[in-house]
């Protein structure tokens, strides 16, 4: 298990991928066709739901399909894992998000995170976006963790776990190219004249991103490389050690 730093999150929230219920659900997902099934949208694209969530204001049932244009809200002590098109999502508790249509009804063009946190893996393809109240991220194929701190003027934490991401916040722009967790703050009010500033790696783990990648038949950059870097938010493999 990789080391992680928690900020306003509990240990249980980042250990969801180790739950027996998720492992069983993920195995069933793969057996039933996994990503191909989700793309066809012939069955539910909910891999696992713990606790309560609302879909367009009504209680979400595990057998339902989450589609583009929908609004999803998770309650306290709840967690939701689902796949849409060639992207997978883990929505943490007390989160509110909307998914806008991409090239098809089952493909996400824009994920709007209004509050809370979402870990996600996006297979390669046309540019899609994650939009929060203080930050916009343009992505093509990557794994990311996004968290909006509503109590802190909707300040956004964004980690490009691997891949290339175009970030914008109040006129500041950064092209993030990461092999291993490059993180930023999208500030509600500029700090030292900047609306985008470097951040440490917080509130998510390698294993979470790996679990989401498997749901869409992907591997992370560090899995492909066979080693990891130092999880300090810089994004590089420098100082890496080969996995045993």
Image (cartoon, rainbow, N blue to C red):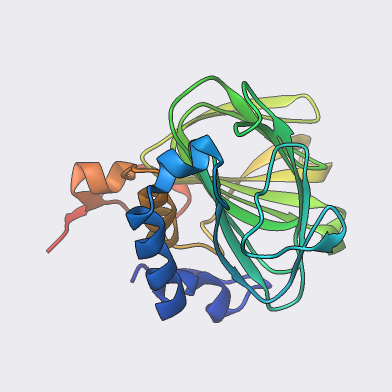
Question: Going by the picture, which residue comes out furthest to the front?
Answer: 42
Where residue 2 appears, as percent x and y from the top left, is 36, 67
Above or below residue 113? Residue 76 is below
Q: Quadrant of residue 169?
A: top right
Front-lying residue, 237 or 80: 80
| Left or right: 73, with 1 as reference point | right
Instruction: Name the image quarter holding the N terminus.
Output: bottom left
User: Is residue 169 something one can see in this rendering?
Assistant: yes
Relative to 220, 75 lies left or right: right
Which quadrant of the rendered structure holds the C terminus?
bottom left
Locate residue 153: give its quadrant: bottom right
Q: As displayed, is residue 202 above or below residue 170? A: below
Q: Position of residue 158 (x, y in %)?
A: 61, 47
Q: Residue furthest left?
A: 244
Which residue occupies 57% across, 22% down? Answer: 127
Where 107 sits versus 204, above or below? above
Residue drawn at x 45%, y 77% as measured from the top left: 21
Q: Is residue 119 above or below residue 237?
A: below
In the picture, measured across the screen, residue 77 lies left or right of residue 47, that is right
The answer to whether residue 137 shows anywhere in this view is: no
Q: Residue at x 63, y 69 (%)?
A: 79
Q: Residue at x 37, y 47 (%)?
A: 33
Count of numbered tags: 0
Which one is in front, 114 or 154?
Answer: 114
Percent x, y of residue 241: 18, 56
């Amino acid at each position: 298990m990789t080391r992680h730093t928690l900020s306003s999150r509990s240990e249980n929230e980042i250990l969801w991928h180790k739950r027996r219920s998720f492992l069983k659900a993920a195995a069933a997902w793969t057996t039933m066709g996994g990503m191909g099934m989700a793309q066809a949208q012939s069955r539910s694209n909910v891999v696992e739901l713990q606790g309560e969530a609302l879909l367009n204001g009504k209680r979400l049932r595990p057998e339902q399909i989450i589609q583009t244009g929908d609004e999803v809200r998770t309650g306290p002590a709840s967690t939701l894992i689902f796949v849409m098109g060639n992207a997978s999502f883990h929505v943490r508790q007390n989160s509110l998000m909307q998914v806008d249509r991409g090239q098809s009804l089952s493909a996400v063009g824009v994920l709007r995170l209004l509050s809370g946190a979402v870990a996600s893996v996006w297979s390669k393809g046309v540019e899609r976006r994650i939009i929060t109240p203080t930050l916009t991220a343009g992505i093509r194929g990557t794994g990311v963790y996004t968290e909006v701190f509503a109590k802190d003027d909707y300040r956004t934490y964004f980690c490009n776990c691997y891949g290339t991401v175009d970030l914008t916040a109040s006129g500041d722009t950064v092209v993030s190219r990461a092999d291993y967790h490059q993180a930023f703050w999208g500030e509600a009010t500029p700090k030292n004249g900047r609306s985008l500033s470097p951040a440490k790696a917080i509130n998510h783990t390698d294993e979470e991103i790996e679990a989401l990648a498997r749901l869409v038949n992907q591997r992370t950059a560090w899995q492909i490389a066979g080693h990891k870097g130092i999880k300090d938010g810089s994004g590089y493999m420098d100082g890496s050690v080969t996995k045993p």
